[in-house]
Amino acid sequence: MSEKIAFVGVGRMGANMARRLKDCGYAVTAVYDVNAAGAAELAAEIGARACPTLAEVVAAADVVFTVVTDDAAQLGVFAPAGDSLLAGAAGKVFVNCATVSPATHVEVDRRVRAAGGVALEGCMASSIPQARNGTLYLMCGGDRATFDRVRPILEKLSTALRYIGTVGQAAQVKALVNMVMNINTAGLAEGLGLGHALGLDLTMLREVFLQTGANSQVLKTDGEDMQNRDHACFFSAAHAAKDSGIAWTLGAQAGLNLPLAGATKQQFERMCALGLGQLDKSGIAELTFKGRHA
């Protein structure tokens, strides 16, 4: 556990990953976030330094995790000029955990290599409690040697660690995971919404779904929340819209028609347009239940 670790992007996922590694005995030396106050609060909690620049983050660590919001943010922290993680990147490892397009991971990998460092995709298919407890499902892409180098760290974050393949492939798999999850979420909202309109007991209906072909992981995580309108955010509708867009774009690039992915993307985009983007993805039920936000 001699590696010094830093985090760029310490929202709920990044902060809990940092806490987890600190609890496991790693030296989490530096954190950075556009929300400087949040970074300072976390730094005080775990004994790290809240760095004012990305260059200082790199100087303080051997391994840097990035957990940012989208493609623009991911490319921004690895900008070719100005304050950037590329400054002093030689010999450093960057584990990039954001759900961004495969092309962005490939471009970041190219930039990091040109600066003398190495990068690894660390795509996550879990949520906030799993980040804190070290039970993430992590899908990794990049050089196998880089994966093996940081595997002991990743094993403290994940109970289901999987090496997918070359750079970009983990992001492709993550896009498909989220595409199917989001489609299931939209379908469940429609099923429960119709059941409500028919006057059925929704607790009974969820129990029937659970024991039949309508069962899904989303039913277990989101079904009761949809029924009770409890949309405390674990995975936001805004992120669901973004991720559905990534998958839909991959389909278009492959020459495929993905009508369910397209319709789901439009539903989550509609949530954002209505100002509901910061609700949990379960909030898509607000668009299907009579008397709600339709």
Image: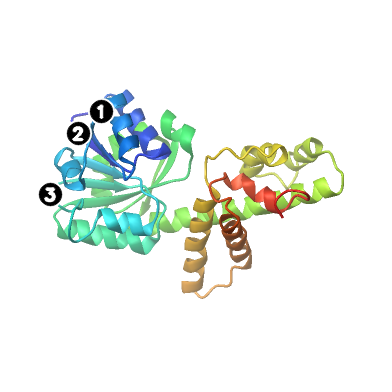
Q: Could you say whether the residue bearing mark 3 is in a helix, strand or loop? A: loop
Residue 110 in sight in this render: yes
Location of the N terminus (image quadrant): top left
Residue 73: % across, % down: 34, 55
For residue 26, which numbered disc appears in the image? 1
Residue occupied by mark 3? 88
Q: Could you say whether the residue bearing mark 2 is in a helix, strand or loop? A: loop
Q: Residues within 10 Å of mark 2 (few under 14, many from 20)?
A: some
Residue 131: % across, % down: 42, 35
Q: Cβ–Cβ below 8 Å for labels 2 and 1?
A: yes
Q: Quadrant of residue 80?
A: bottom left
Q: Residues within 10 Å of mark 3 (few under 14, many from 20)?
A: some
Q: Residues within 10 Å of mark 1 (few under 14, many from 20)?
A: some
Amino acid type, mark 1:
Tyr
Residue 111: % across, % down: 21, 60
Q: Could you say whether the residue bearing mark 1 is in a helix, strand or loop? A: loop
Residue occupied by mark 2? 3
